[in-house]
Image: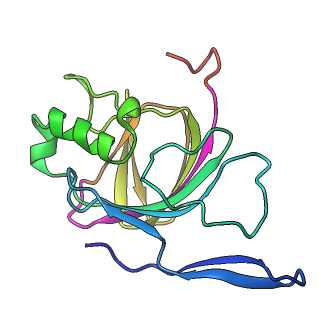
Amino acid sequence: MARSMQRIVTGHDSDGKSIVVHEGNPPVVVELQNLPGTVFYELWSTSATPAPIDNEADPTSGPLCLPPPGNGTRVRVVEIPPDADEYLKGGTARIKDAFDEFGGAHASTIKYDAPHPLMHRTETVDYGFVLEGEIVLVLDKEERLLRQGDVVIQRGSNHAWANRSNKPCRMAFILIDGFFTATSAE
């Protein structure tokens, strides 16, 4: 079940003075049907760099999408429940459906010998902050346990998030559109 979260967005009034233009729960909060307990809170998105600073409509409305827009960013919080055995053993079709559900079907790299069924890769630089709980960053050849306060900088690497604890983990992510160079492309 999604927890409430306060999101405050600032802007400017007609005199150019700073004001709050949006306040309340994020407009897009999605609990994945194919990964129960996984909840996406979409906080903000930009579609250009440099980002336009305006009082236009909220850019987070619309369907859930894993990567940011081209030349843009995406900011979200994700609740990650403890791993369920049904996904770790033989749940490949359901995992593909889950990636489809959050607009990331192209990112899934699941293979029969993958270290985790949620392995994926995006052409982005991602900053991941552990807000609550703990999580294991699973890479192709190694793993790292992350706890509250830890930060991961993902540079287009194939990875998954494994929650091997008995409590949900809450992470904040900032995704920045990028491109693979010759040294990072597969």
Q: Quadrant of residue 87?
A: top left
In the depicted structure, whether residue 112 falls above or below residue 170: above
Does 44 lie within the magenta span? no
Look at the image and tell me whether residue 117 can be seen: no
Does 178 lie within the magenta span? yes
Look at the image and tell me whether residue 152 can be seen: yes
Q: Nearer the viewer, residue 167 or 102?
A: 102
Q: Nearer the viewer, residue 28 or 111?
A: 28
Quadrant location, the N terminus: bottom left
Horizontal and vertical percent for residue 109?
34, 27
Magenta span covers which residues? Answer: 164-179
Q: In this image, 56 relative to 116: left or right?
A: right
Horizontal and vertical percent for residue 90?
10, 34
In the depicted structure, whether residue 84 falls above or below residue 133: above
Q: In this image, 142 relative to 59: left or right?
A: left
Q: In this image, 3 relative to 92: left or right?
A: right
* Residue in the picture at 55% in, 18% down: 185
